[in-house]
Amino acid sequence: MNVKQTTGEILRESREKKGLLLRQVAALLDIDTAILSKIERGERKATKEQILKLADILDLKKDELLIQYLSEKIAYDLVNEDVAGKTLKVAEQKVAYLKSKK
Amino acid sequence: MNVKQTTGEILRESREKKGLLLRQVAALLDIDTAILSKIERGERKATKEQILKLADILDLKKDELLIQYLSEKIAYDLVNEDVAGKTLKVAEQKVAYLKSKK
DNA sequence: TTGCACTTGACACTATATGTCAAATGTGGT
DNA sequence: ACCACATTTGACATATAGTGTCAAGTGCAA
């Protein structure tokens, strides 16, 4: 899994590889070109729905792109906490516990 | 670290153990009693600042309470994703990478 | 039945997220 | 240099989520 690349970078690379324009992809997402530009450069966050649509449009694996997107948000929120590492360990345990309860 | 207890439960237990009233603790936090009641029952989220003040007031270790609080938010957001486990693994790597860049 | 702690729900205010639009900037071709 | 078109930028609008107050309601113990 890609750790050193941002979600925006992945999206831009994939779009250019397919020869698509911002305008074209933005139209499929039903948003203004400006937003997609900002998403690719990391100035704005995409929504989860946009990420899933983008995986379709750009022929990326939905799960992998989603993991990139979700983990980036989490990492960004935690990077300035010095308890970040332990927090993620505990979060794993809590997720496992909550899933088992469902 | 405590995985099966919510932050709210920890806060309520600790407050009651010290014999403090909602009213008293809420006053120290400078919020209405209603909010603290909701925080303890999990109906609302505390802010990070409130968590740190509460650790002081209730003689809890700041780091541990913060980890509880942060991991609970993350776990709650991810529990309905079936990529939750992998997401947290990648998030750990991303945090490590981002911290090394800083 | 009164008093006190706590809970509940309606509401208000603020901050953040998400979007549009138009003008500015960059880029490749002629 | 100029043009056409892709992208970027910033001002602004709207929607949603977060944080709070207040007052009335609930429960319990003296």
Image (cartoon, coloured by chain):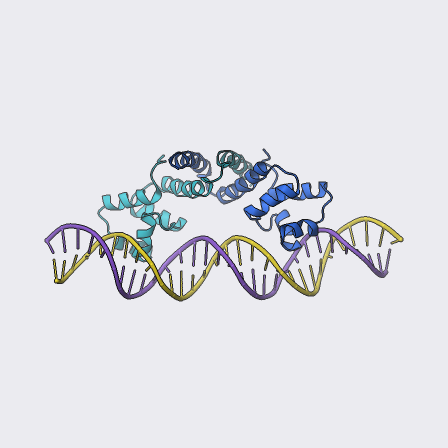
Chain colours: A blue, B cyan, C yellow, D purple
Left-right relation of B28 to A46: left
Count the marks: how many? 0
Q: Position of residue A56 (x, y in %)?
A: 63, 42
Assign the C terminus of chain B to one quadrant of the image.
Answer: top right
What's the residue at 26%, 55% (across, down)?
B23
Q: Position of residue C14 (x, y in %)?
A: 45, 61
Instruction: Say which quadrant the N terminus of chain B sits in.
Output: top left
In the displayed structure, A45 sits above or below B61; it is below
Closer-to-camera residue (A50/A83): A50
Q: Quadrant of residue D24?
A: bottom left
Residue drawn at x 38%, y 40% as measured from the top left: B68
The residue lying toward the viewer, choosing from B8 and A52, is: A52
- Residue B36 on image: x %, y %: 32, 52
Q: Position of residue B52 (x, y in %)?
A: 37, 47
B73 left or right of C21 in image: left
Q: Nearer the viewer, residue B76 or D9?
A: B76
Q: Is residue A49 above or below residue B5?
A: below
